[in-house]
């Protein structure tokens, strides 16, 4: 395959390090001038939940990038960026009205949503903390998935817009009471979406608790860099800097092993088309009906931003780079999209029409003593950051 452009990585790292966009990428004067335009944020009413709660949609604009976020689920409803020809497309999957999310995102596929209290699966829907067993809802076969049946992706978040001269943010806040979905402790969560002039969307998470609990927050956007509704992502070239992953059993619960990716279809240490090995008779792929696994990122630090994944679409020329402070990345290849959901553009979503890349701690960590801990105690602050950097 042709070499993947490095523009995205250069731009993302330059911005994180505080370097100038023009110096880092050599963009034209016209592009630089557009990037200097003042960012904006606006709100509009976007319907009412079945329970009578008003939902708003916020539109964040900065330079060539536009992001729309709804307060229901903290969902990224659309994200528009130009391709290599300058044509703008929405590159995330979703619905065009609130009713779509209330019906279509319940129980899944969690399009664009904030996930909590615990992203990914917990075996048997139970865990023991400080000698006390806690039972969670079972909403994924014998397991609990993404926080339970009435989790953060189905709540209306309190929103506060924040404007600046160079970036624009939307701060979302949610208080989850003690015992919510079986989790102990009152958890106060703040998630801030920030759009800067470098076509970067930063997601910053913070949470505190009044009693010991477990927390694993993430963001569940589905990407198609050719444009929402354009078809399969199997030709997208994916790179994940991880030499190990966490194998799963038939119910997609980790076995506890940290297995090497070398010599298997799980090896994305070099950019590889998503579909190149997805039909190989490899037991892990058979379990997930495609990719639905956690990769153990090869990190140099514990809490600094480091590369988690890079995706390049040869058709549009777009590249997505993900930086995170998290130790893991769940790559899901849209295996269970079955043509029953109508997306933003009016077409149906079929298997492989989008991919999710969820930065996270590992699945089932509360039951896996060998995994990094997800325990949060009073007086501590859960804090993590992920950056989605797009380029053409």
Image: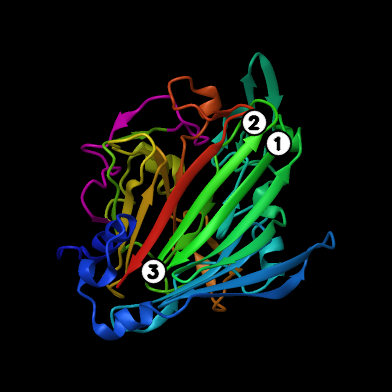
The residue at which mark 3 appears reads as 199
Looking at the image, tell me whether mark 3 or mark 1 is earlier in sequence order: 1
Callout 3 environment at 10 Å: few (<14), some (14 to 19), or many (20+)? many
Residue 294 drawn at (x, y percent): 41, 40
Quadrant of residue 95 within the rendered picture? bottom right
**What is the spatial separation of the Cα atoms under label 3 and label 1, in whole angstroms?**
38 Å
CB within 8 Å, label 1 to label 2: yes
Q: Is residue 196 left or right of residue 310?
A: right
Q: Secondary structure at mark 3?
A: loop
Q: Which mark is residue 137?
A: 1
Q: Which residues are magenta?
A: 248-273
Q: Is residue 329 left or right of residue 250?
A: left
The residue at which mark 2 appears reads as 125
Magenta run includes residue 262: yes
Callout 1 environment at 10 Å: few (<14), some (14 to 19), or many (20+)? some
Q: Residue furthest front?
A: 165
Looking at the image, tell me whether mark 2 or mark 3 is earlier in sequence order: 2
- Which is nearer the eye, 368 or 291? 368
Residue 280 drawn at (x, y percent): 30, 47
Q: Nearer the viewer, mark 2 or mark 3?
A: 3
Residue 15 drawn at (x, y percent): 32, 60
- Which is nearer the eye, 25 or 279? 25
């Amino acid at each position: 395959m042709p070499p993947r452009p490095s523009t995205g990585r250069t731009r993302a790292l330059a911005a994180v390090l505080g370097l100038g966009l023009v110096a880092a990428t050599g963009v034209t004067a016209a592009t630089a001038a557009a990037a200097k335009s003042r960012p904006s944020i606006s709100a509009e009413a976007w319907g009412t939940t079945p329970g009578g709660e008003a939902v708003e949609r916020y539109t964040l604009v900065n330079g060539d990038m536009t992001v729309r976020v709804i307060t229901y689920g903290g969902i990224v409803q659309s994200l528009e960026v130009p391709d290599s020809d300058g044509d703008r497309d929405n590159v995330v999957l979703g619905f065009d009205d609130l009713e779509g999310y209330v019906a279509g995102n319940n129980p899944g596929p969690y399009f664009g949503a904030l996930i909590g209290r615990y992203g990914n699966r917990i075996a048997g829907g139970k865990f023991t903390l400080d000698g006390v067993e806690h039972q969670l809802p079972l909403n994924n076969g014998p397991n609990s998935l993404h926080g339970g049946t009435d989790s953060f992706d189905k709540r209306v978040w309190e929103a506060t817009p924040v404007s600046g001269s160079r970036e624009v943010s939307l701060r979302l806040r949610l208080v989850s009471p003690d015992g919510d979905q079986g989790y102990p402790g009152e958890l106060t969560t703040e998630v801030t979406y920030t759009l800067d002039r470098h076509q970067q969307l930063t997601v910053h998470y913070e949470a505190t608790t009044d009693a010991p609990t477990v927390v694993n927050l993430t963001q569940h956007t589905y990407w198609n860099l050719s444009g929402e509704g354009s078809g399969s992502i199997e030709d997208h070239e994916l790179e994940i800097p991880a030499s190990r992953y966490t194998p799963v059993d038939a119910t997609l619960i980790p076995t506890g092993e940290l297995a090497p990716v070398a010599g298997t279809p799980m090896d994305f240490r070099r950019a590889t088309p998503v579909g190149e090995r997805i039909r190989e008779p490899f037991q892990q792929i058979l379990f997930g009906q495609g990719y639905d696994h956690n990769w153990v990122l090869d990190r140099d630090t514990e809490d600094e931003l480091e590369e988690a994944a890079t995706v390049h679409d040869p058709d549009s020329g777009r590249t997505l780079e993900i930086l995170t402070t998290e130790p893991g990345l769940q790559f899901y290849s849209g295996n269970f999209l079955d043509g029953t959901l109508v997306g933003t553009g009016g077409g149906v979503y079929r298997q492989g029409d989008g991919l999710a890349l969820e930065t996270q701690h590992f699945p089932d960590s509360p039951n896996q003593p060998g995994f990094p801990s997800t325990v949060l105690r009073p007086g501590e602050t859960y804090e993590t950051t992920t950056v989605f950097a797009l380029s053409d």
